[in-house]
Image (spheres, grey):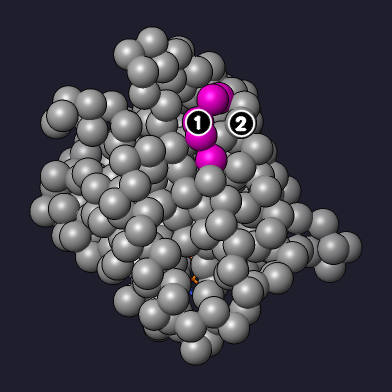
Amino acid sequence: MHTFIQQNRLISMDTKIIDGLALSKRIYDDLENRIKKLKNIGTTPGLAVILVGESSASQIYVKNKVKACERVGVLSKQENYPENITESELLNHIHRLNEDNKINGILVQLPLPKHIDTNKVIEAIDHNKDVDGFNVINAGLLMTGNPLFCPCTPYGIMQILKNEKINIRGSEVVVVGASNIVGKPIAMLMLKEGATVTICNSKTKNLELHTKRADIIIAAVGKPGIINGSMIKYGATLIDVGINRNSENKICGDIDFPSVKNIAGYITPVPGGVGPMTIAMLLTNTVESSERSIKTQ
Ligand code: NAP
């Protein structure tokens, strides 16, 4: 990375575009080896994926997860249920999977139909098989600095930062977005690594006041261009979690890529940054769960 200082002004920086796809492939290779070792001792990690209803977006997400399982050798068990399944029927399926020794991870594709209480469903998953890391036991373990399963997107972000050797300890980290699946857990992981963390939400009064002093910005809002070049400091690391469609119907993130380029030190592109890491970490959680179950047998 190069910076040029002229009359006390930084005028250029080669922004490194982080290749999340390449990193995810390396993670898959590593998982393949770990799975081979498990198979040699008679165990195959198993992931159950529950899909309720016919949403085409959810079908694509589930298909990609099942495909990734096949790629590395995880046994996948996809269970599809109709939109009108009752809450108690769905809970019974989860209880059955909780008891199934061949299943190390249970994932319920969200969103669920409105007549089903999503929290109740997430809480029904045995926390030892909660590979999405969404239930309150896993959220609590993460909060208290002793995570069992980290939610996949935040876990993937940590791998990206680690792989790029980006310093977290003592850094100013600004998380934009405070959801239970991205914003809050990534803030906890950053705190655990010694960062000073600010979490912004829709009520934050002056977003750029915070983002301008950040060494690392995690944008997880779902609004294209919510972060632009005038809101960041030179050399900042930008992690773009957002998945949106721009005016040309193309996939884009939350960060205005052209305006931050040559100001940021690092940026994850959309697509090809955080996205591929999310599924890689789902499989990592499943394999870790399988390895743990061997140790406790
Ligand atoms: P979410 O549940 O909709 O939460 C959005 C968060 O953004 C909320 O905390 C909201 O604040 C905050 N927010 C809204 N407007 C804001 C503003 N003007 N300034 C600051 N914060 C603002 O979203 P999510 O599920 O975390 O997802 C966020 C984005 O990431 C979406 O585009 C989603 O598609 C994408 N995503 C990508 C991946 C991946 O694998 N790459 C995974 C998950 C999500 P309040 O709390 O005040 O409402």
SS class of the residue under badge 1?
loop
Image point (22%, 44%), residue name: 148
Residues tagged 1 and 2 counted as in contact (Cβ below 8 A):
yes
Give the percent coordinates (x, y) of residue 24.
55, 29
According to the picture, the residue beneath numbered tag 2 turns out to be 70
Image point (60%, 62%), residue name: 80
Q: Amino acid at mark 1?
A: Val
Q: Which segment is the magenta one?
A: 72-76
Give whichever of 224, 243 is nearer the camera.
243
Give the percent coordinates (x, y) of residue 172.
30, 48
Give whichever of 290, 239 is nearer the camera.
290
Give whichever of 193, 208 is nearer the camera.
193
Residues at marks 1 and 2, CA–CA distance in whole angstroms: 6 Å
Q: Of the numbered discs in the image, which one, if any, rests on residue 74?
A: 1
Q: Amino acid at mark 2?
A: Glu
Image point (52%, 59%), residue name: 50
Q: Is residue 74 magenta?
A: yes
Q: Answer left or right for 251 relative to 65.
A: right
